[in-house]
Image (spheres, rainbow, N blue to C red):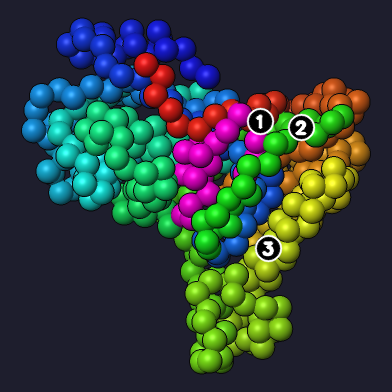
Amino acid sequence: MMDIEFVRSRFIKHFDGKTGNVYASPGRINLIGEHTDYNGGFVFPGAVDKGVMAEMRANGTEDTVMAYAIDLKDRVDFKLSDTKGPKASWARYIYGIALEMKKLGVLVKGFNIAFAGDVPLGAGMSSSAAMESCFACGLNDIFGDNKVSQWDMVLAGQATEHNYCGVNCGIMDQFASVFGKAGCLMRLDCRSREFEYFPFKPDGYRLVLLDSVVKHQLAGSPYNDRRNSCENVVKHIAAKHPEGKFETLRDCTWEQLEEVKEEVGAEDYKRAKFVLGEKDRVLAVCDALTEGDYEKVGEMMYKTHEGLSKDYEVSCEELDFLNEIAKENGVTGSRIMGGGFGGCTINLVRNDLYRKFIEDAKKRFNEKYGHEPKVYDVVIGDGSRKIC
Ligand code: GLA
């Protein structure tokens, strides 16, 4: 996690010398269950020990926000009453979450904020959800008497993405960032919003992320197209079955998908096929984890990668190459993690194979792409919180 004194020193320097309160929120990993959240399915994320830290303080104005992005050395001031909001993409997260928290009844006034992060940007580890939940936690504390529930903060973060950042995301990232617990993965049913903590201590294995450093950018990207494809398939199935209730692909069966295969077209069909398969895989992984069968977990991860690459088409050459290297090194499970279009693979690897795998991946990736992948050992950490 970040150093409080580092954030504090910048807050003091860039504003009026006074200190505020400090809040932190993590990024996340996801063991399995990709692109299932907005389809009403299951996901299996956990918070990581990397995230965003912000110092915040009411500044006595009605609605002027003075914001400093420490890592970018960028200062933006804006008014919450300005209907367009700031242009800088990082500042839109602050603007968006403040307006969403207002909708929840929080009397947000002007405030100063300085923040920094150590969750890599664009790596598919949800740096944006870390920002949203960190700022939400701060605003709830400073202006809201902490009356807004954790779930409402999750939804406010998601609404920020939808309404101010152009990404029609599901709820996995914000959920993981708010509810994370050290040492535990969480199985979330995105339809009912019920969830369970799963202590994750895979004896003899570890999780490691390999970051391709290919920039991952979901805004205005084909992410929204994937979601539209899924919704289109549901519409077609619903039209064929007026007696049923079809809200998301979660409500649809393999047979029903086959029925609309021709009319929805090859692309939407393939995408829906991936989602139905992924729904089954998450449940298989839950059983395997309960039985301590990590080889089975790994097998499902490889299948997910294949589906994400060939059917959902959110992988890229570099990620497929990292997946291939994992396979050749006997790594138990490996797959692209998060929204896709770049970012990381998540790898479940036996302790005795770890060193050789990492060395081989670095060497071969470097030979092919001229730089090494970044390596992040996964430490599962706590969710959003006030630090001081
Ligand atoms: C992004 C979105 C999530 C989820 C994943 C894919 O991270 O923000 O809601 O859809 O992609 O699983």
CB under 8 Å between discs 2 and 1: yes
Magenta residues, start to end: 169-186
How far apart marks 2 and 1 lie (CA) works out to 7 Å
| Quarter location, residue 45 | top right
Which badge, 2 or 1, comes first in the chain's sequence? 1
Query: Residue at coordinates 34% horizontally, 11% vertically from top-left?
Result: 8
Q: Is residue 348 above or below residue 12?
A: below
Reading the image, the residue beneath label 1 is 183
How crowded is the residue under tag 3: few (<14 C-alpha within 10 Å), some, or many (20+)? Answer: many
Query: Residue type at mark 1?
Result: Gly
Q: Is residue 176 above or below residue 307?
A: above
| Quarter location, residue 87 | top left
Q: Does the magenta stretch include residue 177?
A: yes
> Is 186 or 116 nearer to us in this picture?
186
Reading the image, the residue beneath label 2 is 201
Q: Where is residue 318 in the image (x, y as percent from the top left)?
A: 70, 42
The answer to whether any part of residue 117 appears in the image is yes
> Is 124 or 175 nearer to us in this picture?
175
Query: Residue type at mark 3?
Result: Lys
Query: Residue at coordinates 27% horizontally, 44% vertically from top-left?
Result: 101
**Of the residues tagged 2 and 3, which is closer to the observer?**
2
Q: Is residue 48 left or right of residue 352?
A: left
Helix, strand, or loop for circle 1? loop
Q: Is residue 110 left or right of residue 280?
A: left
Helix, strand, or loop for circle 3? helix
Query: Residue at coordinates 37% horizontally, 44% vertically from top-left?
Result: 149
Reading the image, the residue beneath label 3 is 279
Query: Residue type at mark 2?
Result: Lys
Q: Is residue 12 above or below residue 59?
A: above
Q: Where is residue 251 in the image (x, y as percent from the top left)?
A: 59, 75
Q: Where is residue 29 in the image (x, y as percent from the top left)?
A: 62, 39
Q: In which quarter of the image is the C terminus?
A: top left
